[in-house]
Image (cartoon, rainbow, N blue to C red):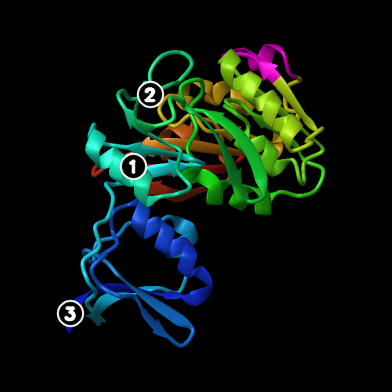
Amino acid sequence: MTVSQWGIKVPKSKGESFRRYLLANGDWCPNLKPISNGEYLVFPTVSESITLPDELADCDCDIKKYEFESRAAVREPARHELIGGIAIMQDDDVSEAEYLLKSRPSIHTVLHCESPVFGEYRIKKFRVLAGKETTRTSYIEYNNRFTIDLAVAYFSARLANERQRVLRLMKDGERVLDMVTGVGPFPIALSKKASVIYAGDINPGAVELLCENLRINRTDNVIPMLADALDLSGVLPPHSFDRIIMNLPMTSTAFLETAFSLAKKGGVIHYYTLQSEKGEMLPLLRGFTAGKIDERVVRSYSPTQHHAVYDIVCE
């Protein structure tokens, strides 16, 4: 039996990236079979309204109605985020967590997130619903290996493509500063091209994990710093960095003055923020520079907000 349903047509070369994004954001229609059509795939979607990150929106894709074959209903696990061997569920449902654990052999623990990000160290509270009593796991991202402890330091796998985008923008030999580094995903990704990266965080647990991850990946051009981002201008030479990462979406505005004081003329600041409307932060940023500012949607965050990045050229 065929069913008329919204679908998104995408290049096969980008099929896996689209599939993961649609699944992670609840846009996938699981009871219909995707269509393979020459150089393209068509994935069934729950509606025509899909917010894509810029790296996918820039692809040759199109959303319209298609005729899909229906397939036997499959019991899908509850929506969750996967980080290494840990699944994080939105709902506090032990029976559903047990089902998820059985249906995904690669998972060793299912957690429920009991709080938003809080405190000076930007952590969340978790409760184990099923599996091993741990918040620690191993995670692989573009051949880089990380030890993650979600109760000790905040981490999101959803910026994996964004880290690779920044790496592609870099020139060999750049001096880089990551002002709020966490366990080190940005510096380890960018170390392939940088001459040196200063990676700071105020959270001692995050810096300890950063050091462990530098050892795991045999990365020797990253300098860990246990430091408050607000104090960096008193520690590092002014106007000495080609590229600065500001990935603290909820409160990084407080660090803008420090970032601009440390960036070289012509250097680039990647400023990440949560916003409700496109261009929301432009008036603020224009108070610091007349240079070029490019804005990109990174991902949907909530029904009313999205995660954005401003690539700012310092003049």
Neighbour tally class for label 1: few under 14, some 14-19, many 20 plus, Cα within 10 Å: some
In the image, the segment drawn in magenta is 225-236
The answer to whether marks 1 and 3 mark residues whose Cβ atoms lie closer than 8 Å is: no
Q: Residue at x 69, y 26 (%)?
A: 212
Q: Which residue is mark 1?
A: 301
Q: Is residue 202 visible?
A: no
**Amino acid type, callout 2:** Val
Neighbour tally class for label 3: few under 14, some 14-19, many 20 plus, Cα within 10 Å: few
Per the model, the C-alpha gap separating discs 3 and 2 is 41 Å
Quarter location, residue 258: top right
- The earlier-in-sequence mark between 3 and 2 is 3
Outermost residue on the bottom side: it is 38
Disc 2 secondary structure class: loop
**Amino acid type, callout 1:** Tyr
Q: Is residue 151 magenta?
A: no
Percent from the top left, x then y, of residue 67?
23, 83
Q: Is residue 257 visible?
A: yes
Q: Which residue is mark 3?
A: 4
Image disc number at residue 128:
none
**Is residue 12 left or right of 90 when viewed as pictured?**
right
**Is residue 229 left or right of 196 when viewed as pictured?**
left
> Which is nearer the eye, 219 or 132?
132
State the quadrant of the C terminus.
Answer: top right
Per the model, the C-alpha gap separating discs 1 and 2 is 14 Å
Neighbour tally class for label 2: few under 14, some 14-19, many 20 plus, Cα within 10 Å: some
Percent from the top left, x then y, of residue 42?
36, 76
